[in-house]
C-alpha cells in the first residue's frame, strides 16, 4: 500500500482553518475553530495508528494482524471531551448574548491603556504617582468620586449610577441591597 498525501493535507487544512477561526473575535467562530482542531487531532491520532487490522480478539485474529485498540480509545475519549468543552463554550456564548446582545468580544480599552504605559516594573509602581484615570478601581480616591453627599452606602451610589441597567439576564438590581 502506498502512502497517500490526501490525509495529511486534510489534517493540515483542518488545523489551519481551526487556528484561523480561533483567532477571530466572534465567539461562534472560536467554537467552530475549536471543533475543527479537535477533528484534525482525531484524524491525526487515527492516521498515526497505522493500517487497519483485524479485531483485537485472541482466537479470531492472529496477533500480528490485530489493530491497536489504544488510538481508537484515545479518539473516543477525545470526542467526549471535545463535546463537553464545546457545550461549555456554547453556554458561555449564550450567556454573553443574553447579557450584552452580541457574541463578539469587544476591544478592551483597559488593555490598550496598560499597553501604552512605559515599561515600569510592578514593584516600583506606586498608585499614588499615577494619573487619576490610570489608578486602579479600588484606589482610595476612587470612591469619593462615585459617592455623593447623603449616600449612606456604596450600594446606593452604584444603584443610582447604574439605574435601569440589569446586572443579569433575570433583571436583578445591579447591587445587593443591605438587608438590615
Image (tube, helix red, strand yellow):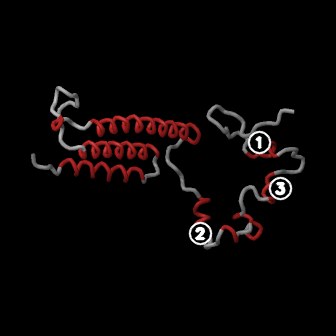
| Residue neighbourhood size for the residue with mark 2, other residues' Cα within 10 Å, grouped as few (<14), some (14–19), many (≥20) | few
Residue 100: image x %, image y %?
A: 57, 42
Vertical position of residue 122 compared to residue 21: above or below: below
User: Which residue is under mark 2?
Assistant: 116
- Disc 3 element: helix
Q: How many marks?
A: 3
Q: Nearer the viewer, mark 1 or mark 2?
A: 2
Q: Report whether 109 appears left or right of 33.
A: right
| Closer to us: 105 or 130 | 130
- Disc 2 element: helix
Q: Residue at x 26, y 42 (%)?
A: 46
- The quadrant of the rendering that contains the C terminus is top right
| Residue neighbourhood size for the residue with mark 3, other residues' Cα within 10 Å, grouped as few (<14), some (14–19), many (≥20) | few
| Residue neighbourhood size for the residue with mark 1, other residues' Cα within 10 Å, grouped as few (<14), some (14–19), many (≥20) | some
User: Which residue is under mark 1?
Assistant: 159
- The quadrant of the rendering that contains the N terminus is top left
The outermost residue toward the top is: 59
| Closer to us: 48 or 106 | 48
Kindly indicate whether the residue at mark 1 contacts the one at mark 3 (C-beta within 8 angstroms).
no
Q: Earlier in the sequence, mark 1 or mark 2?
A: 2
| Closer to us: 12 or 60 | 60
Residue 133: image x %, image y %?
A: 71, 63
- Label 3 and label 1: CA atoms lie apart by 15 Å
Vertical position of residue 126 compared to residue 39: above or below: below
Q: Report whether 14 appears left or right of 30.
A: left
- Disc 1 element: helix
For residue 23, what is the image quadrant? bottom left
Amino acid at each position: 500500500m502506498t502512502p497517500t498525501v490526501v490525509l495529511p493535507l486534510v489534517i493540515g487544512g483542518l488545523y489551519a482553518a481551526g487556528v484561523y477561526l480561533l483567532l477571530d473575535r466572534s465567539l461562534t467562530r472560536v467554537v467552530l475553530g475549536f471543533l475543527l482542531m479537535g477533528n484534525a487531532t482525531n484524524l491525526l491520532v487515527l492516521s498515526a495508528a497505522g493500517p487497519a487490522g483485524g479485531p483485537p480478539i485472541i482466537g479470531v485474529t492472529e496477533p500480528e494482524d490485530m489493530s491497536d485498540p489504544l488510538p481508537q480509545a484515545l479518539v473516543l475519549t477525545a470526542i467526549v471531551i471535545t463535546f463537553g468543552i464545546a457545550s461549555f463554550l456554547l453556554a458561555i456564548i449564550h450567556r454573553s448574548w443574553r447579557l450584552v446582545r452580541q457574541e463578539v468580544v469587544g476591544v478592551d480599552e483597559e488593555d490598550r491603556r496598560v499597553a501604552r504605559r512605559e515599561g515600569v516594573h510592578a514593584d516600583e509602581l506606586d498608585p499614588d504617582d499615577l494619573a487619576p484615570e490610570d489608578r486602579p478601581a479600588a484606589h482610595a480616591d476612587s470612591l469619593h468620586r462615585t459617592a455623593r453627599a447623603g449616600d449612606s452606602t456604596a450600594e446606593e451610589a452604584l444603584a443610582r449610577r447604574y439605574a435601569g441597567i440589569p446586572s443579569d439576564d433575570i433583571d436583578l438590581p445591579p447591587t445587593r441591597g443591605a438587608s438590615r
